[in-house]
Amino acid sequence: MSIKNIFKFSLDNMSRSKKKLAIVVLLQVVVFILVGQVLIEYNKQKYILDKCENILSAPPEKCEAIDFESADLSEEKTIEFVKEIYKTEGLLAVGHDCAGVQGIVSTIFNGELRNIQSSNPYKTYIEMDDSLRCRDTQKSLIPYYEFDYVDKLDISKNQPMDTAYLILGNAYKDIKVGSEHIEVLENGIEVHFVVVGILEKGEEFVETKLVDPQEIEIINCDYEIFIMYPMEDYQYSRPYVSYAIDKKHTVEEIHNKIIETAEKYGLARDDISFLNAKKSLEIYNEPMNYVVGMILDIAIIITIATVLVSICIQSVTIIDSMNVYGIMYANGVTRKDVTLMLVLENLVKLILSIITAYAFARCYYSLAFDETVTFSNELAVLNSIVIYQVIGIGLLVMVASTIVPLIIINRNTPSKLIREIM
Amino acid sequence: MIRLNNVTKIYETQGIKTNALNGISLEIEDGEMIAVMGPSGSGKSTLLNIIGCMDTLTSGKYEYNECEVSALKQGQLNAFRKKHVSFVFQNFALMKDYTVYENVELPLLPRNISKKERKKIVNEKLELMGISELAKKFPTQISGGQQQRCAIARALVAENDIILADEPTGALDSKTGDDIMEIFKQVNKMGKTVIIITHDQKVAEKCNRIIKIEDGKIKINAK
Ligand SMILES: Nc1ncnc2c1ncn2[C@@H]1O[C@H](COP(=O)(O)OP(=O)(O)O)[C@@H](O)[C@H]1O
Ligand SMILES: [Mg+2]
């Protein structure tokens, strides 16, 4: 039979039993969305994990974080101390977060930096819930956010603890006003924001600007290190400061300086501790590996379940119309034709399902995340990978749900198939 | 010419063997019209299925003209069926989701005939069967006799040389059955070999030859 006729026949066949088609497509849509969600999460975690492992293969010597063991950050003296840390000579790329971005600290360079004034952090503000906030950032997932005007904001009044206060570290080379960043919170919501100003030493923040998302360029960061806190250690209210150390200074030297500063502000020696990037990554890696493994397991289970369910549906559909294949065989349709027919039918179902699932996912995201939907470049890459992964799984489903009915059909002689109606 | 030589067919289901055909030897000339009779379960349908390559034989030899059909593989059997055989069944074997027109069109699809040509052929056969006005109806919307006419039209569009009919009048009242038999006679006159399974002596008498089967063996083979 010519492909054209096979195609016509398959389409006919499907359009005659729209209910069955709808059920199969709907089921596949649900499953593809589920698998897609799991895969998105998996890819994201795997991406971070890979990065960690990459860093671990050549761990940065001079990247550290300060862990505020027992220091009370709502206290004035601690806040003053945190502010003072930035001014420590020999510190580069200082990042600071006191809100609960689980497990992830900020980024730190390990190369030469331009346009960076050490201990002069870039501050980014975001409007949330009608109040202006400054937020932490997690490099690598980057787009934009629309901003309102804010006049003469005095950050010294913005205490770290009452906002999600963050300094986008000097970790960014060539950081510019207008460059955008995104933070992915634990609940998956992305907070997008933009660099609205760069402070010189001792300067205060001036104003934010409304930024047209279209005009924003994405900053490229060619150096980055995550300092990870072990998850079980990292509490919501436990802030930290992370930094890299200048070539000219030794680790001990910096430690001593920071401890000195701490003592100056009335903190005890054991109120703070230093966490080495390598060590923190190692501690972080282990549970992460477990989590990533678990997510992958879930994805595999869902995939296997999908394959099985669609095999069942297909088989039931086929058994339901066995005699049709008998009639076809009796009228000169060959086995090859039947095979192609099934492949085409399942391919059409697959395409319908994937398009529907994709459209649904897009709608869902645009509803759930409103104007912040536009994906960052790296996130977009991850998400486009998900599409391919889902298509791959879809093809697997298609092959399985073609082969099994074919076996069922071809195990019977045409005479037996046609007798199904007799 | 169809030539069967000592053909046997043994079905095996769950370890139980059934000798459906027990050494059948038979020759059928091109253009013959044959009635196959015999009690239920005697192997009539099996014989027809083997002739029509809907089933394979267990032992013996089946030749059609120069071709040794019993030596063909599954793919070749499909091709043989496509080229030589058309069927008419007691229960009509129409696709219920397809219209009369589409059912009749079915054998033309694997034969890669253009849409225009298909339309011409189908309409011609529908007219021949006197069911042109039913073209857009579905099998469930027409009577048994009309369904069987539709099935015969489908058997005819392929222009194959052998028409195999398994109790084509079995589900019809006798008046309609007579009409259908008239159609088969016409078909036979077109030069096609027609083999009809029937329980009805009256139907059988319309054929050139009657073959009676019992327990998978030919009991009577008479003109
Ligand atoms: N597919 C099959 N599997 C097992 N036994 C079968 C099968 N088809 C037919 N038979 C058996 O073969 C014998 C002949 O059947 P059949 O040719 O249908 O008889 P008839 O058409 O004369 O009534 C019967 O005993 C029947 O039960
Ligand atoms: Mg029978």
Image: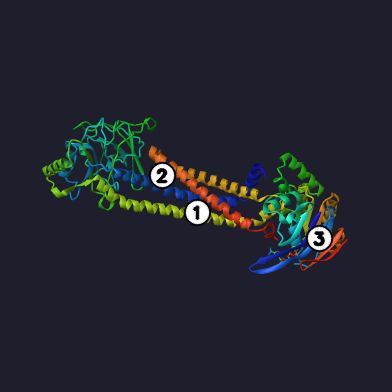
Residue on which the image places disc 3 = B26
Residue under the image location 78 percent in, 57 percent down: B165
**Three-letter code, disc 3:** Leu
Q: Along the polypeptide, which appears first: circle 1 or circle 2? A: 1
Residue A204 coordinates in the image, percent (x, y): 21, 33
User: How many C-alpha atoms fall within 10 Å of the one at disc 3: few (<14), some, or many (≥20)?
Assistant: some
Q: Nearer the viewer, mark 1 or mark 2?
A: 1
User: How many C-alpha atoms fall within 10 Å of the one at disc 2: few (<14), some, or many (≥20)?
Assistant: few
Residue A368, label in figure: 2
Left or right relative to B22: residue A60: left
Q: Is residue B209 above or below residue A206?
A: below
Left or right relative to B14: residue B94: right
Residue A306, label in figure: 1
Find the distance from the CA under tag 1 to the CA under tag 2: 26 Å
The chain holding disc 2 is A
Q: Is mark 1 within 8 Å of ligand 1?
A: no
Residue A7 coordinates in the image, percent (x, y): 63, 44
**Three-letter code, disc 2:** Ala
